[in-house]
Image (cartoon, rainbow, N blue to C red):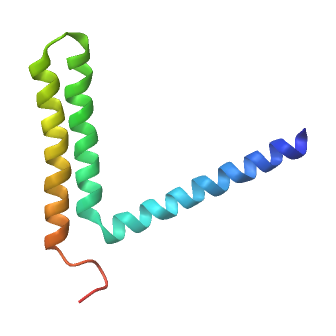
Amino acid sequence: MSKILARMKAASQLIALNAVAWLRTMLATEPARVRAAVMSGVVALAVFVPALANSNIAGQVTGVVLFLLQIVMGEQTRSRVTPVGKE
């Protein structure tokens, strides 16, 4: 049983290290995409959570539109800038 737990702990540490490395790479090479993802998350939480408290359909539709708008704007910004290391 302890071998299984040790392997699970090692696997979880490896996954966490790979996630941190991926995040650092994304922050260095794709800052516009990361910024769009963070803004999308903030907008989603700011709109969806209060919209769940009542049955206002307009609030939920507005939340979806704002969420998608942030993603689209981030992708447009990303396509305009040159990636780091490519000239």
- When the figure is inspected, residue 15 is found, relative to residue 69, above or below; the finding is below
User: Where does the image place residue 17, in percent across and percent down from the top left?
Assistant: 59, 58
In which quadrant of the rendered view does residue 85 lie?
A: bottom left
Quarter holding the N terminus is top right
User: Where does the image place residue 49, in percent across and percent down from the top left?
Assistant: 27, 22
Task: Please state if 1 lies on the left or on the right of 32 as rendered.
Answer: right
Quarter holding the C terminus is bottom left
> What residue lies at 47% left-to-right and 63% top-to-bottom?
22
Count of labels in the image: 0
Can you name the residue that lies furthest to the bottom here?
A: 87
Task: Please state if 33 lies on the left or on the right of 19 as rendered.
Answer: left
Task: Please state if 81 lies on the left or on the right of 85 as rendered.
Answer: left
User: Where does the image place residue 75, in percent across and percent down from the top left?
Assistant: 19, 60
> What residue lies at 17% left-to-right and 47% top-to-bottom?
70
In which quadrant of the rendered view does residue 54 lie?
A: top left
Q: Nearer the viewer, residue 56 or 35?
A: 56
> What residue lies at 58% left-to-right and 53% top-to-bottom?
16
> What residue lies at 18% left-to-right and 44% top-to-bottom?
68
In which quadrant of the rendered view does residue 60 lie?
A: top left
